[in-house]
Image: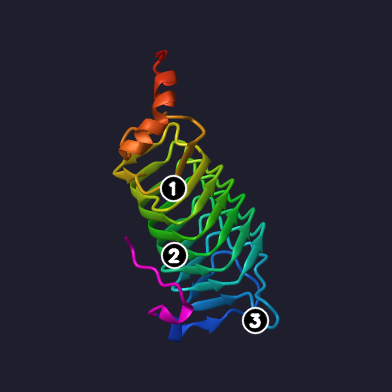
Amino acid sequence: MPSVPDQLAELPYAHLLIPHTGPLRRDERYDTVHFDGSAPAGPELAGPANGATFLECAFTGVELSGTKFRQARFNEVWVQGSRWIAVDCAETEWQDAGFVGTVLAGLTCYGSAVRRVVFRQCKLEAVNLRGATLRDVVFEDCLLRDVDFGDAKLTEVSFPGSTLEEVRLAGATLRQVDLRGAARLGLADGPNGLRGAVLSTVQLFELAPQFAQALGITVKD
């Protein structure tokens, strides 16, 4: 599991961070910048920041609504205690990033590349990850509700302690996707898309009626 700290001071680049000033800009490069929602004036994050690059940046207590990050790149970024609502993250690239105690709702993330990213104690609701590529990603103690992985490619993805509700996997390609630690498996498409996943025996029994229905099997005692 990728290592992600819970506190800002634990970041290896914490001592280099500088406060963000001014609006977000397209194609801008943000290097060791701290976007802090608790700052006296608060950061101006209306955007758009399409095509921008964020390197070793931190977002703490930040509320984003409708901000545009399309085709932006996030490398070694840490997001804590924030709310990202209806944010456009389509075709973005994420690598070595961490989300801690953050709400992500109504996000557009289709076609994105997500690598070595940890979501810890986060709430993801109505997040569109269709056609995205996820590799070495961990959803730890999260709530995933109405998250769409349709036609996505998931490799070495795990869900320890997470609750899945109305999650869609139809058309997805799964390789070493570990669902055994999930607290609940609520799959909108039933067993469709589970090829390549690892399930526990208990989960297999819980999904048995859906497998039978998908195969046209009637079970009677």
**Badge 2 is on which residue?**
98
Amino acid at pointer 1:
Ala
- Foreground residue among 113 and 175: 175
Q: Residue at x 52, y 51 (%)?
A: 143
Q: Which of the pair 179/50 is nearer the observer?
A: 179
- Residue 174 spot, x, y in % from top left: 34, 39
Q: Is residue 80 left or right of residue 98?
A: right
Q: Position of residue 74 (x, y in %)?
A: 46, 64
**Residue at the (44%, 47%) spot, across then down:** 183
Query: For numbered disc 2, what is the local secondary structure?
Result: strand
Position of 22 with respect to 122 (left or right) is: right
Instruction: Evaluate whether residue 31 shows in this view.
Output: yes
Q: Secondary structure at mark 3?
A: loop
Marks 2 and 1: which is nearer the front?
A: 1
Give whichever of 92, 11 is nearer the camera: 11
Q: Quadrant of the N terminus?
A: bottom left
Magenta highlight range? 1-12
Amino acid identity at mark 2? Gly
| Residue holding disc 1 | 183
Q: Is residue 20 left or right of residue 205?
A: right
The residue at the point 39 percent across, 55 percent down is 138
Q: Along the polypeptide, which appears first: circle 1 or circle 3?
A: 3
Give the vertical position of 182 relative to 171 (above or below): below
Report the disc number at residue 39: 3
> Magenta stretch: residue 140 in it?
no
CA neighbours of label 3 inside 10 A, class few (<14), some (14 to 19), many (20+): few
Residue 155: % across, % down: 32, 46
How far apart are the alpha carbons under marks 1 and 3? Answer: 37 Å
Is residue 194 shown above or below 15?
above
Q: Quadrant of residue 198?
A: top left
